[in-house]
Image: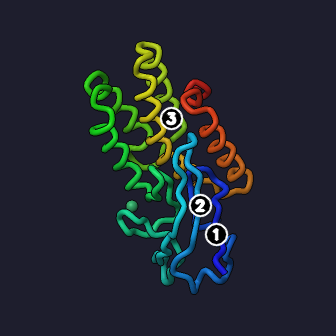
């Protein structure tokens, strides 16, 4: 009786994919099981996800509930084996900067902040903002190979948030295909992805 949702997009669970599995039954459901693979071969999310109702004009539609802030969201992304909404994923990148990467922060905190702002700091990520971030990261990599690991972690965290934007924007079938290919490409290429966009 328990169907499990396996997200076709690496790192992202969308309410559209959930609806595709359960159809009209979804209206009467409050929770479901899901498995969402993580980018870069990280820990996947496996577990229960709560459904929420999001107000839309006079009515309401079904959404996913973020386990961290409990807000309704159309998409959730995987981070450290947990699902998070866009806002919570962004907060994670700040926490990672402060707690997980102290040495890099001390050496290159300014660049780090700029990259975060370009990619995930405000509203929707544009292609030109992403290109500027890529250029900045490439300069950092060229200047100091020792920072590679730290920059990769940062890039990964920021892209989790940016991948969700792209998936939400991908309403046309062809764009969905593109978003899917992009997610797979990121997962497979890791840090090399950045160079690819230069
Ligand atoms: Zn949240």
The disc label shown at residue 15, or none = none
**What x and y, as percent, mark residue 124?**
47, 48
Asked if the residue at tag 2 contacts the one at tag 1, i.e. Cβ–Cβ closer than 8 Å, the answer is: yes
**Residue 6 in the figure: left or right of residue 73:** right
Q: On the rendered image, what quadrant is the N terminus found in? A: bottom right
Camera-side residue: 60 or 7? 7
Disc 2 or 3, which lies upstream in sequence?
2
Q: Secondary structure at mark 3?
A: helix
**Residue 168 seen:** no
Q: Farthest residue toward the bottom?
A: 28
Disc 3 target residue = 130
Asked if the residue at tag 3 contacts the one at tag 2, i.e. Cβ–Cβ closer than 8 Å, the answer is: no
Q: On the rendered image, what quadrant is the C terminus found in? A: top right
Disc 1 or 2, which lies upstream in sequence?
1
Please name the residue shown 48% across and 38% down the image: 156
Disc 1 target residue = 4
Alpha carbon separation for disc pair 1 and 2 = 7 Å
Please name the residue shown 51% across and 70% down the image: 48
Q: Dot 2: within a 10 Å radius of its alpha carbon, few (fewer than 14), some, or many (20 or more) residues? A: some
**What x and y, as percent, mark residue 21?**
68, 71
Alpha carbon separation for disc pair 2 and 3 = 29 Å
**What x and y, as percent, mark residue 29?**
56, 82
Q: Secondary structure at mark 2?
A: strand
């Amino acid at each position: 009786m328990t169907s499990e949702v396996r997200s076709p997009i690496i790192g992202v669970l969308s309410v559209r994919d959930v609806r595709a599995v359960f159809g009209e039954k979804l209206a009467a459901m409050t929770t479901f099981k899901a498995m969402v693979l993580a980018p870069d071969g990280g820990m996947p999310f496996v577990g229960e996800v709560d459904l929420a109702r999001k107000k839309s004009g006079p009515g309401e539609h079904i959404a996913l509930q973020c386990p961290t802030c409990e807000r309704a969201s159309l998409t959730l992304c995987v981070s450290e084996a947990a699902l998070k909404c866009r806002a919570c994923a962004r907060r994670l990148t700040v926490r990672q900067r402060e707690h997980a990467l102290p040495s890099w922060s001390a050496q290159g905190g300014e660049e780090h902040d700029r990259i975060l702002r370009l990619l995930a700091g405000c509203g929707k990520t544009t292609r030109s903002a992403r290109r500027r971030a890529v250029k900045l990261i490439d300069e950092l990599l060229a200047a100091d190979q020792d920072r590679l690991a730290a920059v990769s972690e940062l890039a990964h965290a920021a892209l989790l948030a940016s991948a969700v934007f792209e998936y939400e924007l991908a309403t046309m079938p062809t764009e969905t295909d593109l978003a899917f290919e992009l997610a797979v490409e990121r997962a497979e290429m890791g840090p090399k992805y950045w160079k690819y966009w230069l």
